[in-house]
Image (cartoon, grey):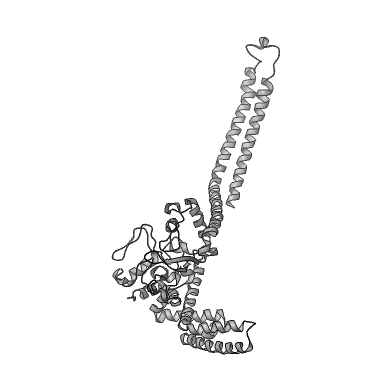
Amino acid sequence: MLIHAASSYRTIGLVIALIVLTGFAVYVLFNVFATGTKEIGSEVELAPNRKPYFDDEILETRRLEFVQTVGVGTLFIICLALPLYWLGEPGRHEGRDEFTTEIFIERGQEKYTALCSQCHGAGAVGGQAAYTILDENARYVAAVNWTAPALNTVLYRFSIDEVTHILNYGRPQSPMPAWGAPGGGPLTTQQLEEIIEYLKSIQLTPEEITADVQAGLRNEVIARVRADHAEAGTKLNDATAVLNDAAATTADKAAAEKDRAAATQELTDAFDALIDGLGAAVLGNDRDATASLLDTYLVGLAADNLEAYGELLFNNRGGAGGYGCARCHTAGFSWGADELLAANPALEGLVEPEIPGGGGFGPSLRGVEAQFVSAASQEAFISAGCSPNLQYGNNGVCEPSGQMPGFGDESTDLDGGLLTPEQIAAIVQYERGLE
């Protein structure tokens, strides 16, 4: 609508200008060239005056009135056109900004698809990046898949300046390279702005974030129960594969059916120990029932065992780890150090096991009470995150670029945050229990 208004005002201005120019041209054509080029006789007969001009009677009446009328008309047009043009100026500016934003979003999406989506996923929902683990002498240890966080919530935890810094300089000790020219990357400042403009256009709503966090917590509960009964889970998957294999013999299928029944019963009992009825819902793929039962369980956990609830939040893998703390504060969490060691025992000593809160890209949180004397001050810091050169706790100082994201609703200019104050309080209680 604003762009249309701006175009209408511009059209009116062009029409007025065209009328004025046409009238002036007609006047010049008929009053200068048409009459001024007539020559009667030779140059000698016309000299020194080439033609007779109007006498005073005509000049001081009809001609004078004509010129005055033209002047008044021109003044009227100017007085009308300038206010109209001025009234349309805000619309033109907003229309230009909207048009520029649309162009930036389109270009940013193209660049994101070409450069970022292979790690952060289509639509910035998170993905995986190939990464090589090296020892302290830069020798090859293992090739892993590093979980790259979702970026469809990145502006809820980082400011635009902080995102720009990350794009410019990358993330050390991770697959994230420097994309901006200041960090040696290939992209210009405007190209980074285009990518950020695209990311702005796809940020989730606060309601979607809440649902995403909750889904991550549900998956964490299920993953933990399955991890505690990994052998039964493997047996269940193997039996299911045999039953789905058309080439399997009748005897094989009968044996697989027994294995599946036994494994199903073990997992069901495990889930039932967690919450009545949950096992059957999960194993029956009834997602609505599973979600409802898990939500009930999580509500009870938040009320009865805040530290256990905080541990789930700390390790939440929702949003490819973007809602949790372990991605930065537990080395190896993003690429599964424990899983790698379990699959390759020979790497023991070369790959350190995951130590919850033991530090990684972010500092160790073990003994965090020495930094934050009160839980309330720690909660406030987690909620707001770092701002450049901010002093926090007893002796902490944020980097000039910030870096530590904010998880509360006051961390950025967007409405809403990643976590509620109650969830942040649960995380703090878990962190302050780490030793």
Question: Is any atom of residue 22 visible in this view?
Answer: yes
Establish if 197 lies above or below 213: above
Quick check: 150 left or right of 357?
A: right
For the residue pair 68 and 413, the one nearer the viewer reads as: 413
Furthest residue in direction right, as rendered? 41
Residue at x 59% of width, y 33% of height: 74
Q: Position of residue 178 (x, y in %)?
A: 44, 57
Question: Is any atom of residue 281 visible in this view?
Answer: no
For the residue pair 324 and 90, the one nearer the viewer reads as: 324
Q: How many marks?
A: 0
Q: Position of residue 297 (x, y in %)?
A: 47, 81
Quick check: 69 left or right of 312?
A: right
Q: Position of residue 239 (x, y in %)?
A: 57, 84
Quick check: 19 left or right of 92?
A: right
Q: Position of residue 146 (x, y in %)?
A: 47, 67
- Residue 336: image quadrant is bottom left
For the residue pair 139 and 162, the one nearer the viewer reads as: 139
- Residue 304: image quadrant is bottom left
Residue at x 56% of width, y 56% of height: 110
Q: Quadrant of the C terminus?
A: bottom left
For the residue pair 261 and 213, the one nearer the viewer reads as: 261
Establish if 329 lies above or below 83: below
